[in-house]
Amino acid sequence: KQEVTQIPAALSVPEGENLVLNCSFTDSAIYNLQWFRQDPGKGLTSLLLIQSSQREQTSGRLNASLDKSSGRSTLYIAASQPGDSATYLCQGAQKLVFGQGTRLTINP
Amino acid sequence: DVKVTQSSRYLVKRTGEKVFLECVQDMDHENMFWYRQDPGLGLRLIYFSYDVKMKEKGDIPEGYSVSREKKERFSLILESASTNQTSMYLCASSLEGARGYTFGSGTRLTVV
C-alpha cells in the first residue's frame, strides 16, 4: 500500500526566507504527484502537478520536483511571505494517497 | 469561476440517521472523489468515481455508499450515521490524470 510521509510536520520561518518542504512515498510506481495548500477550515487548492513524464513544475515562487528513483518530492518556496502560511500536502495521484501535511507559518 | 460545491457547510445529525452529502461540479470533470479529514489521520479516501454510474472503494468505505447518476453530481451516503463518522468531508473532482484537481469547501458533519 502506498504511504506518503511529509517532513517536517510543522515549520516556522521569518518572512523572506527560502524554504523546502519534503514528501516521500513508498511505492516507486507513482504515476504523478501533486502539491496542495489548505487554509484553516477550508478545502484544498492545487498548487503544482508533476506528471509521470516530468521532473519538476514551477509556478511563480513555487517549484516542485519529483525523483521517482528515490521516492521523493520537494516543494521549494522562494522569498516566503506571510500569505504563504498554510498547511501544504502532497498527494501520490495514482494511488490517491495524501501525506499528513506540513503546517507552515511565515513570521512577519 | 469553476467550482465544486458541497451542499452544506455544517451538518448535525443523530445516530442511526441516513445522511446524504451532495457534491456538484461545473467543470465537466470525469473523476470525482470523497475524502474525510480528521486530526492526526489526515485525508483519507472513501470512494471515487471515474464515470457516471461507476464507483470504486477507497481506503475506508465501510459505513458509506455513493451514487453518481449524473456526471456533475456525486453523493456520499451514510447508511446509518454513527458518532465515529463525525468528521470534515471533502469532495473533489478532476480530469483524467489528476489534472484540474479541485476541492469543495467541505462539510463538517457532527453525529450526536
Image (cartoon, rainbow, N blue to C red):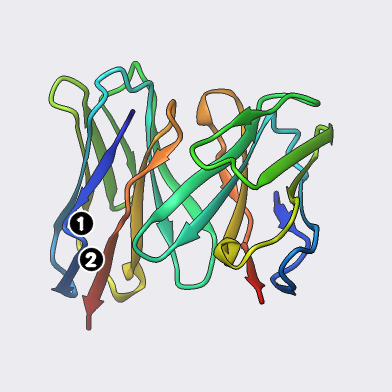
Q: Give the letter of the chain under mark 1.
A: A
- Dot 2 crowding, Cα within 10 Å, few <14, some 14–19, many 20+: many
Q: Secondary structure at mark 1?
A: loop
In terms of image quadrants, where is residue A79? bottom left
State the residue position of label 1: A78
Please tell me which residue lies in front, B111 or A79. B111
Residue drawn where x is 28% and y is 53% of the image:
A61
Query: Which mark identifies residue A80?
Result: 2
Q: Are marks 1 and 2 in contact (CB under 8 Å)?
A: yes
Residue drawn where x is 32% and y is 54% of the image:
A100
Tell me how many marks there are: 2
Q: Residue furthest front?
A: B16
Residue drawn where x is 62% and y is 62% of the image:
B106
Q: Residue furthest right?
A: B69
Left or right: B13 in relation to B47:
right
Q: Which amino acid type is shown beneath numbered disc 1? A: Ala
In terms of image quadrants, where is residue B11? bottom right
Left or right: A29 in relation to B65:
left
In terms of image quadrants, where is residue B53? top right
Please tell me which residue lies in front, B46 or A13. B46
Left or right: B33 in relation to B77:
left
In the picture shown, does residue A89 fall above or below A108?
Answer: above
Q: Secondary structure at mark 2?
A: loop
Quote the CA–CA distance across marks 1 and 2: 6 Å
Left or right: A40 in relation to A58:
right
Please tell me which residue lies in front, A92 or B27. A92
Residue drawn where x is 45% and y is 62% of the image:
B38
Q: Residue B22: where, in percent of width, then height?
A: 78, 53
Q: Give the letter of the chain under mark 2.
A: A
Let me know if marks 1 and 2 both belong to one chain.
yes
Q: Residue A19: where, in percent of width, then height?
A: 15, 58
Q: Which amino acid type is shown beneath numbered disc 2? A: Ser
